[in-house]
Amino acid sequence: MRLSGWRRWPLMGLLGASLGLAGCGGLPAPPALSDAEVLATPDYQINPADTVKVFVWRAPELSVTVPVRPDGRISLPLVDDLQAAGRTPTELARAIEQELSPFVQNPRASVVIEQFADNLAETVQIMGEVKKPTAVAYRPRLTVLDVVVAAGGLTEFADGDSAKLIRRDQTGERAYQLDLQQLVVNGELSKNAKLRPGDLIVVPQSLL
């Protein structure tokens, strides 16, 4: 599961990021991520407009797939209103069990996200001077080179060695330097970096 609160990058914010970061120097390289870090995924917190699948063991009549309403709540058989947004699937399952306990003996529930309201939270986006700005579905061990290739490569106007990786986490937003010219053109694989879901790559235009 993934972190909540990761939303579509606003267009104006993206443009500001690409312009503002293009001239920034001295940024650190992206941190090396171990296999444990790229395979580990933080608990996802449910958001409004997600769709959740609720399974109640030995009670198929109570097992349903429902959308999370704009107010963050869901309605289930025997449960009119239950707060879902802001909870992890496991937390919601335990809350469902508590609500059903007056009606069902030893209820056991499980919850999975059937559909995310914002699928871009599960992607890595690349914009700027690439041939096909795109969002690439995240998978473990996805790298910068994988995303650049999916975008069709750099344009002739790209300043690849001024590219930036913007990463959001629970502590805020961080920017890292990417040396795409050395990676893509010169084949320096030491410049490749593993990515995280929600990462954004910005490739500025060369000023020359």
Image: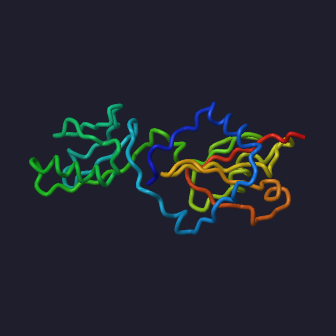
The residue positioned 67% from the left and 50% from the top of the image is 165
Q: Is residue 86 visible?
A: yes
How many numbered circles are shown? 0
The image quarter in which residue 12 lies: top right
The residue positioned 49% from the left and 40% from the top of the image is 118
* Residue 123 image offset from top left, x and y in percent: 57, 48
Give whichever of 84, 169 is nearer the camera: 169
Give whichever of 64, 46 is nearer the camera: 46
Q: Is residue 130 visible?
A: no
Give whichever of 39, 175 is nearer the camera: 175
The image quarter in which residue 26 lies: bottom right
The image quarter in which residue 107 lies: bottom left
* Residue 93 image offset from top left, x and y in percent: 27, 52
* Residue 184 image offset from top left, x and y in percent: 80, 56
Q: Is residue 138 above or below residue 192?
A: above
Q: Is residue 23 above or below residue 145?
A: above
Q: Quadrant of the N terminus?
A: bottom left
* Residue 110 image offset from top left, x and y in percent: 29, 54
Q: How is the image coloured?
A: rainbow
The residue positioned 21% from the left and 45% from the top of the image is 62
Q: Quadrant of the C terminus?
A: top right
The residue positioned 16% from the left and 46% from the top of the image is 99
